[in-house]
Image (cartoon, grey):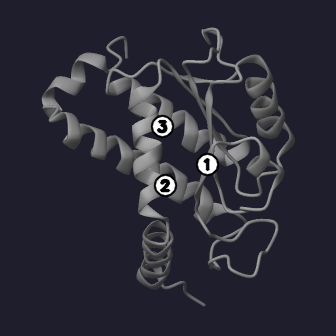
Amino acid sequence: MSCDYKKVVSDVVSEISKALMSIDEKSVVALKEEILKAEKVYFVAVGRVMLSMQSAVKRLAHLGISAHYVGEITEPCFTNKDLLIVASGSGSSIFPLNIAKKARALASECKIIHIGSNNNSEMKNIADFMVRIPVRTKNYLDDEIDSVQPMTSLFEQTTLLLMDIIAKMIIDEKNINMKDLWQYHANLE
């Protein structure tokens, strides 16, 4: 029995496109604006979503934005001038949820944005707003986009691409020359 590679590619790309197109554009623009307004931008997530968010930290750093992942060894102090982006499909993962609570307690004027699928999670009482990616999570909500991929792969892929899309929106808005971005790229590699 053989696997049809091109069929799987088509299915995966199709559902990623569907997921990205289902995100409310106003919430994406609002997230971009909060990133640009913040003194520092922090991200928190767990598992494979964490890897997507760590990629976002690196990409924003390439744009000259002070971006950090919660728990990194060089993480600076979080203040009222900062933004915390919490990525959790379910909105109930203990570590991101508790970091959001702590951020709100430490800096009540900070901005907290939840990127997730479950718009009825405990995060709705903490975050300033949500960027909803309505894809299959462990909650299996009725309005989630189903996926042929295992577990929450579609959410992880969509968060990664969403943040790269926001980076491109920032590049376009600021009219940044792509060649100039290399000044922020690691050079001890």
Q: Secondary structure at mark 1?
A: strand
Q: Is residue 134 left or right of residue 64?
A: right
Q: Is residue 60 left or right of residue 73?
A: left
Of the image marks 1 and 3, the number of the one nearer the N terminus: 3
Q: What residue is shown with label 2?
A: 27
Mark 3 residue crowding within 10 angstroms, few (<14) / some (14–19) / many (20+)? many
Q: What residue is shown with label 3?
A: 56
Of the image marks 3 and 2, the number of the one nearer the N terminus: 2
Is residue 87 or residue 59 the one in the foreground?
87
Does the CB distance between marks 1 and 3 fall below 8 Å?
A: no
Point 61% across, 48% down: residue: 129
Q: Relative to 131, does residue 65 appear above or below in the rendering? A: above
Point 49% across, 30% down: residue: 57
Q: What residue is shown with label 1?
A: 129
Foreground mark, 1 or 3, reads 1
Does the CB distance between marks 2 and 1 fall below 8 Å?
A: yes
Q: Position of residue 138 (x, y in %)?
A: 80, 65
Of the image marks 2 and 1, the number of the one nearer the N terminus: 2
Q: Relative to 2, does residue 103 appear above or below in the rendering? A: above
